[in-house]
Structures are given as C-alpha cells and as structure tokens.
Amino acid sequence: MRGEVAVSRINRRDFLRSAAVGSAGLVLSPSFAFGQESVASLPDYKGPNVIIMRFGGGTRRRETIDAQYTYSPYLSKELPKRATLFPMTEIAQIDGLETSHGQGTLNIITGKYGKYEDVSDGFLRERFEPEAPTVFEYLRKTYNVPSHQTLIVNGEDRIDEEFYTFSNHHLFGLNYRSNVLSLYRFKTYLLRHKVDEWDGSEKELKKMREELHKMESLDDRNEGAISTAEIDGFWERWRQYYGDTGFVNPRGDRLLTELAIRAIRELRPRLLMVNYNDCDYVHWGYLSHYTRAISIMDEGLKQLVETVERDEEYRDNTIFVVVPDCGRDSNPMSAVPCQHHFGSRSAHEIFAMMWGPGIPQNTVVDRVVQQADVAPTIAQYMGFKGEFMEGAALAEAIA
C-alpha cells in the first residue's frame, strides 16, 4: 500500500508542475525557483497586515478566556476591551474529523474541515497535505506579495507543520506558497553554509551533503530552492546575533515570539501566522506544563502587540486573529490530564478573538461559530475571494 501511495503522490506532483507550466504563459510566466515568481500583472497589496496567533498546543476556554481561572490575563482581561470575542467557537462534530494540532491548523488556514490521512513514514511525525488552498495562497494569487512576506513561524518540535505552506489544489499550490521561519529552517540554512565553506575531508563533506539533502527533501512536493535571498539574510543576521550552537537563542514558544518580532522588523510580513504549541507538553502528564505554556503564550502575545504598536507602519494597519488549534479533555478522572485525541466535547470547544482597524471593540458575540469561519473572515479583511472555503465570514468582526 505504501508503494501505491508513493506512485500517486509522484503523479500528482508531476501533474501540478506541468499544469503550472502550461498556464504560466497565459497568466504570470513564473520561474519555479522559490521566491522568483513574476507577479508584475498583479496589483500591489494595500490592505491591512494580518497576524494569526495560533494559541496552540490545545487550550481550553477555562484556562484562557475565563477571567476567573485564566493563566493568560492579557488575553482574557486586557485584549477584550479592544476586540470582538467569539467565546462559543467550535470545531465541528463531524464523523472522522479529529481534534488535534495539524488538523486544527489546516482548518484555520483553509476555511474547510478536512479528514486528513497521514502521509509520513515516521512515528509521531504525522504529516498532512491540504487539498484546499491556504490563505497564503489566496493572498499571493490575488496580489503582488512576495513569499517572504507571507510567513508561518513554526515550533521545533512539530516539523510536520513545516509543510503547510501550500496545498495540492490544481489552481493554487507550489507557485503561491508561503515561507517558514523555524529552528529547523535555521539548521538547514546553517548546514548549507557549512557545506559551502567546508575545507575538511571528503568523507565528512559527503556526510554533510547527504544530511542537507535529507533536510531539504522532507517535503517532496517542493521543487528547486527552499529559500530566498530575504530569508537567507534574515538567518545570517540571526546567526550573527545568536551564533551557531542553539544554546543562546530562546527555545520553545519563546523562540517563536522572538522569530515573529524579528520578522516584523526585518521582513515586513503582510500575513503572518505564529504556531504556538508548548501546551502539548501536558502529554508528559503534568498539568503545570500546560498552564505554564499558556502563560508563556500570553506573554508572547503581549510582546507582539507591543511590537506592532511601536511600529508606525504597522500600528494602525494590523489586524490580530487569535484562535486555538483545538481544545482539551475536561475529564478530571483521566490519568493524564487535558488530552484531546478522544474527541470529547471540550476538545471541540475553542474561541476566536479579532481586533484591529475597523473591528468593533469590547464586543462579545453570543452565538456558536466555527473554526472554519476564521479563514473567510481573513479573506474579508485582506480583500481576496476564498472560493474554496466552506466557512462563513464572521460578520460581527467586520465593519
């Protein structure tokens, strides 16, 4: 069966490449080197920046937006004054739809609930391929926005989520992908430079080249280079500041906050998604791993808001969207607290919050909405048509 799947994936990849080449002369005439797309025929994007904060790793309403029990006081007590809050957001109860991190992330960025099959070969390396276009693809197909200004900031412990940069949809896909900032990408950049600068034995050089090829080939849908001059420049400055060891730079979700802040200052993204995930360490069995991670996300959220408020170009032109990937089990009798794989009701219960120019302030919406409604709302903010989304834009958060 694995062999049959592999053949299917290769055929699909070849089809996507040939389809893109066939349509290139009619529309954009793109080069397939990453970041080299010609988008001269597209209008410049002049709408608001959007920052999506995946309050991730699975968080319940109780420890987040419930002011009485919260571990995120900034999120629950300060931000609602300037935001529209949807406290009754849910992940739909659909047969076969799982409440987990990758699935929830794809629900958020595609605006569509999917039943995903793992296409990876490794234990605990769950990999999904989105079939519906992502918000990054919609934006880049509509406007002249380079890949380094559509960014996913990803955690080092969920490398599988490195590959949600583009879908397999035949009208979108590879040529409209976003870029990724993560420790994995930095390690790849670093190894590439070590190979270029190596003056030691051929045996060691061969070993490094094999490792580099492995790291750059984890997503076999990619063709050509996986970086751009702008991203390489970002990593060079990171390297100059933090060095090569990894012992100096922040780790975990604090790393994501630092990457996101530097991205805002240096790369000027128009659409940025920060995939916090440290709450998932609760699977080790300690509730404090979960609650402390919520506090760290809350601190990071405050830092990002303050970064935007200090930036003249971003201050009055940026919309924030905060939404969890999934909820968590509230069963007090469970041996390991706060699971989410059992599909319990509370694992489906999340929230969504939006604030920024044009969004009503101090507003709580008393109706059930869907996680899949987030992407159509972003489409409204940014002025593109999400024609393959199934959710509905949240009218209460749109002026």
Image (cartoon, rainbow, N blue to C red):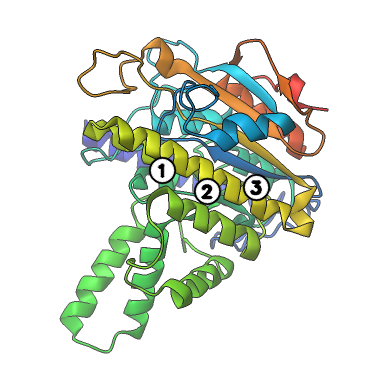
Residues under numbered marks 1 and 2 in contact, where contact means CB atoms less than 8 Å apart: yes
In the image, taking residue 209 as reference, residue 90 lies left or right, namely right
Residue drawn 65% across and 55% down? 307
Mark 3 — residue?
305
Looking at marks 3 and 2 on the same chain, the residue that comes earlier in the sequence is marked by: 2
15 above or below 69? below
In the image, taking residue 44 as reference, residue 68 lies left or right, namely left
- In the image, 51 versus 283, the foreground residue is 283
Name the amino acid, label 3: Val
Q: Is residue 19 visible?
A: no
Rendered image: mark on residue 161 = 1
193 above or below 186? below
Q: Position of residue 211 (x, y in %)?
A: 26, 65
In the image, taking residue 280 as reference, residue 396 lies left or right, namely right
Looking at marks 3 and 1 on the same chain, the residue that comes earlier in the sequence is marked by: 1
Q: Quadrant of residue 387?
A: top right
Residue drawn 32% across and 23% down? 338
